[in-house]
Image (spheres, rainbow, N blue to C red):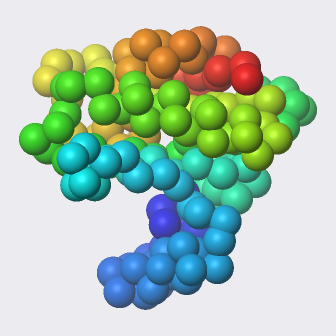
Amino acid sequence: MTPRLSRAEYEVNKGEGNKRRMKRLVEEGPPPGLLAYLGGESVAWCAIAPRERFRRLANSRILAPVDDRPVWSIACFFVAKKHRGRGVSVGLLDAAARYARNRGARIVEGYPVEPRKNPMPAVFAYTGIASAFRRADFVEVERRSLTRPVMRREL
């Protein structure tokens, strides 16, 4: 729920309150993101929706809109530890792009990190890693921070 709420809203509902809000989003639709499965087990998640659904992006100086073109945003990721480093993120990015295109999007955008140190602690990679975006045919279109490119894929 972090990218969907203001910092204050997130903090007030921290824990169970935010879990209930996410459950409500899932039940009411449209889906707030995609799950990746391997052998029937869910192993990864990404949040994808039109950019305006992610309130934190609206107030971000670093992730401010690049232009006035409508975009769908991939705002966060999670890959189960035992499945990291196997290309799951790349597959999930491809699926997210197809999902957005099938719903009328022309551009999908992400805000990954560009690690300055390897290995990077996983807790800081919740927006994805730039190298995975590149492997999924996203290109850097803006960089207002040393470690946070804005990357897009034209659909």
85 on left or right of 82: right
Q: Quadrant of the C terminus?
A: top right
Q: Furthest residue to the front?
A: 39
Whole-percent x, y for residue 64 in the image? 70, 37
Q: Residue at x 54, y 13 (%)?
A: 137
In the displayed image of the protein, which residue is found farthest to the right? Answer: 68
Q: On the rendered structure, is 43 left or right of 103? A: left
Q: Residue at x 22, y 55 (%)?
A: 41
Can residue 93 be seen here? The reply is: yes
In the rendered image, residue 120, in percent from the top left (x then y), is placed at 19, 29
Q: Which residue is at a point 53% across and 55% down the rendered structure image? A: 33
**Location of residue 77 with respect to 95 vertically, above or below:** below
Residue 73's place in the image compared with 155, above or below, is below
Q: Nearer the viewer, residue 2 or 152?
A: 152
Viewer can see residue 145: no
Q: Is residue 133 above or below residue 51?
A: above
**Where, by quadrant of the figure, is residue 135 drawn?**
top left
Q: Nearer the viewer, residue 67 or 86?
A: 86
